[in-house]
Image (tube, coloured by chain):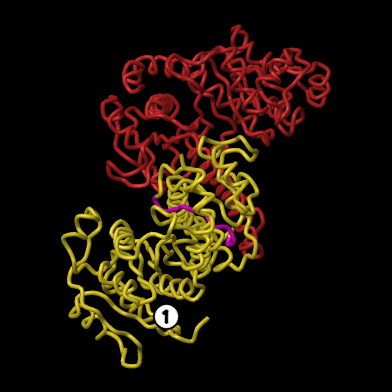
Chain colours: A red, B yellow
Amino acid sequence: MSDKPVRIAVDVMGGDYAPVEVVKGSIEAIKQGGIEIILVGPLDTIKAELNKYDVSSLNITSVQADEFIKEGEPPALALRQKRNATILIATKLVKDGRADAVVTAGPTGAQVASALTILGCAEGMERPVVGGPVLGFAPNTIVMDYGGNVDCKPYHLLNFATVGCVYARKLLNISNPTVAILSIGSEEGKGNDLVKQSWPLFKKSGLNFIGNAEGHDIVAGKANVIVCDGFVGNTLLKYSEGLGVAISKWLKVVLSGKLPDEVIGKMQHDLFTKIAGADNIGGAPLLGINGVSMVMHGRSKAPQFVGAIMQAKAVVEAKLIETINTELLKMKQHMESAKD
Amino acid sequence: MSDKPVRIAVDVMGGDYAPVEVVKGSIEAIKQGGIEIILVGPLDTIKAELNKYDVSSLNITSVQADEFIKEGEPPALALRQKRNATILIATKLVKDGRADAVVTAGPTGAQVASALTILGCAEGMERPVVGGPVLGFAPNTIVMDYGGNVDCKPYHLLNFATVGCVYARKLLNISNPTVAILSIGSEEGKGNDLVKQSWPLFKKSGLNFIGNAEGHDIVAGKANVIVCDGFVGNTLLKYSEGLGVAISKWLKVVLSGKLPDEVIGKMQHDLFTKIAGADNIGGAPLLGINGVSMVMHGRSKAPQFVGAIMQAKAVVEAKLIETINTELLKMKQHMESAKD
């Protein structure tokens, strides 16, 4: 941990509730201490938002960027056409050493494209990975990848495991994280081709590989790092969130009149944390990128921005990205051996 | 619907709680009317169990089978060595027209192998499919395949959709079921190779195809039939069950002292139905097989046997299997066009 404040570049125009909730969350986060905020967006918009608060004593600066990428725009094309897009300018601040991390709730495709082109991928990675503890029920279990890395090969899963183990050590303080491959049977030989082909690679990896984990094993926290194709991980994440919404509504219906509203409200909140914890943290770092870029839900509001900004601070202070990139480099030769 | 009772062959030795819970459940089921039970197992074991009840007025017969397959035995080998295994004898009763359906909580691998060799696959199917409404939150949404059909090709997904639509029409009374492909983005072009390659096939299928559905869309019931690779479906199913157990325990802890125990107990039960509904029905038919064979969880107890037996009755009376096989035949040419 360093005494120097962590400098967070925040994309003011990213997300469904930009700029209002973005600026609100940034101000709430800065009050927690240890950070500087660099708001990136149209200066007049930023000024109008900041005028709503007393920010005289807060370490907030602004950087002009008068374009932004909307949800649904083809990322590559949009970024070529909008050289002044907030996500590009904010990511460049990280590249240039003027910020330690970028935080955005803007379109993930544009964020990933910006991170890839400006910061670049870590050695041995082709695309960034997203993952972390998904469930409050299993706070020490990381599922990776829950981003969109689909049609994975065995060496991708090994990548995920390598990254996940660093995450577990650095952010969850687990010294020798256990690793499992998500499958549909617990024994060796059970699963699809990807799982079966990954086993020999994992066995020889030097990781603390404990075999397969099934869907219910995620909930039970059978391993610290459970790897899967990003199609499966992303589906599980969204399924969990959908269940969180549905169960929360159900609790309200069933308990109304039986318990005070505030008790029900707290239960709803707690339940959501238990089964859709990722949503609660606010943001997750793109892993396998040469820099800190925090990905968020488009529907994030101020509390999620606080969460993402404070998570960015933790990621920077833990030197998560640097350590991941070192470990990926160590694993590189073993991974290469798995490619055709 | 026919007035003739439906004849159910029950594998007395299948499942973790066999034979006690199997026989108990069979007797409870028969009291609901409209069925005959044929208990298949060692006659002395059956007799000992039946002696615990007054069964004099019940339509129960027994068929001798003095071997059975244990969980973990390699199915093909075990079935070759144990010609008198309960699952084989029970499945043969269906083949020979002496029973309308077989119900077992024994190892699924052995059951599938028995169904494949004795009853045979429907035209156009390579392996049976398992699916049905998974969630009480979305009772009109069928996820298919949640069995173990992994590494699927596009024509497999079309198979699942064809089967699922018949299920929706026959058992859920939905006249023109909507069909979606599970993916990680809602628009065309989002997803993995399987999803992308399946789109053209689905568009031309004549099915009521509405595009992609994401994880949360399963919970929201976006389509009546949502198809996916069996690896994903099975993982979702087990994940749901794991969450059901965890949330149920959490409810107990949070609500204890606040509400009477019986209210909490009912909530736990209802919650489980909401998020792990498949477990509640008790059993699901293997679809794409020339006969009715109900698959169950190994940990099933009497209520699940009642559920599976009554579900078997519904499947037989709806002529589900015959209709599926007719529809598969109609779709065959279109599916063949998708094979290399």
Q: Residue furthest top?
A: A96
Q: Residue furthest bottom?
A: B57
For residue B192, above or below residue B84: above
| Left or right of residue A249: residue B34 | left
Residue drawn at point x = 49 percent, y = 87 percent: B3
**Residue A3 is inside the magenta segment:** no
Q: Which chain does the numbered disc 1 sit on?
A: B
Range covered by the magenta-colored residues: B139-148
Q: Residues within 10 Å of mark 1 (few under 14, many from 20)?
A: many
Residue drawn at point x = 49 percent, y = 65 percent: B269
Q: Amino acid at mark 1?
A: Val
Quadrant position of residue B168: bottom right
Q: Is residue B268 visible?
A: no
Percent from the top left, x then y, of residue A106? 67, 27
Q: Which residue is mark 1?
A: B6
Per the picture, the main secondary structure of the magenta-coloured stretch is: loop
**Residue B140 is inside the magenta segment:** yes
Percent from the top left, x then y, of residue A190? 31, 44
Q: Nearer the viewer, residue B312 or A139?
A: B312
Percent from the top left, x then y, of residue A93? 64, 11
Residue drawn at point x = 53 percent, y = 32 percent: A147
| Left or right of residue B60: residue B262 | right
